[in-house]
Amino acid sequence: MKELREITANHPWNLMTTSADEGQFLNMLLKLIGAKKTMEIGVYTGYSLLATALAIPDDGTILAMDINRENYELGLPCIEKAGVAHKIDFREGPALPVLDALLEDEANHGTFDFVFVDADKDNYLNYHERLMKLVKVGGLLGYDNTLWNGSVVLPADAPMRKYIRYYRDFVLELNKALAADQRVEICQLPVGDGITLCRRAK
Ligand SMILES: C[S@@+](CC[C@H](N)C(=O)[O-])C[C@H]1O[C@@H](n2cnc3c(N)ncnc32)[C@H](O)[C@@H]1O
């Protein structure tokens, strides 16, 4: 994981990567819940993916999606070196159509133990509705960046970088929707940029 971090540190988009403490947290969480069938939306160079792949058993699986294969391939040698690449089914392209295709087959419903969502914030609620059908009852959904650089607790007119301001309303909307969703139990953790865990309760 250290080596993958070093490769990513030299990449021009390196601010996008999951923090080291989030990686450790994910790894520990997945071991604790005994996750086997997992999914990740938003791979980038694969830091959280490697944390997941190292935590699940040898016959565990990760359906991993990203619109950019090049970045995934940058980190892939580290994943291969760790001996966990066989657990990963990488799909290049937007995640929503892949989820819709999975939903068409009833056999996929309620089968995932864990899903980590770390991609386009303006689609998180679209992901949530689909993932609620794909995760099993008692399974977990993890949404990254729910503190959105701390901006979710700032007044709307506070100074913010353009990128932060643009997605802030989507993150606020997600946080409200998750808090009101009777189908899940939630817990927001101040790890990295904030991870909200949702346990499918029914
Ligand atoms: C914050 S980065 C992911 C960081 C990664 N989890 C890590 O640990 O380093 C977000 C990623 O989401 C991807 N992405 C953006 N829109 C997407 C979409 N519609 N479907 C799938 N991936 C998408 C981007 O290409 C980018 O690699």
Image (tube, rainbow, N blue to C red):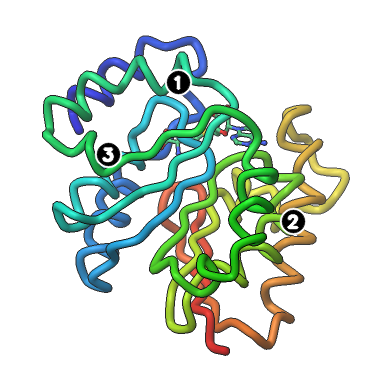
Q: Residue at x 76, y 58 (%)?
A: 172
**Can I make out residue 188 in this image?**
no
Q: Residues within 10 Å of mark 3 (few under 14, many from 20)?
A: many
Q: Residue at x 35, y 15 (%)?
A: 74
The quadrant of the rendering that contains the N terminus is top left
Q: Which mark is residue 14?
A: 1
Q: Quadrant of residue 185?
A: bottom right
Residue found 73% across the figure and 61% down from its top? 174
Tag 3: amino acid: Leu
Q: Residue furthest right?
A: 157
Is 128 placed above or below 69 here? Answer: below
**Could you tell me residue 85's position as x and y percent?**
23, 34
Q: Residues within 10 Å of mark 2 (few under 14, many from 20)?
A: few
Q: Is residue 198 left or right of residue 128?
A: left
Q: Secondary structure at mark 2?
A: helix
Quarter of the image that includes the C terminus: bottom right
Determine whether the beta carbon of the residue marked 3 sits less than 8 angstroms from the nearest atom of ligand 1: no
Q: Nearer the viewer, residue 15 or 115?
A: 115
Q: Which residue is mark 2?
A: 126
Q: How far is mark 1 from mark 3, CA to CA?
A: 16 Å
Residue at 85% across / 49% down in the picture? 156
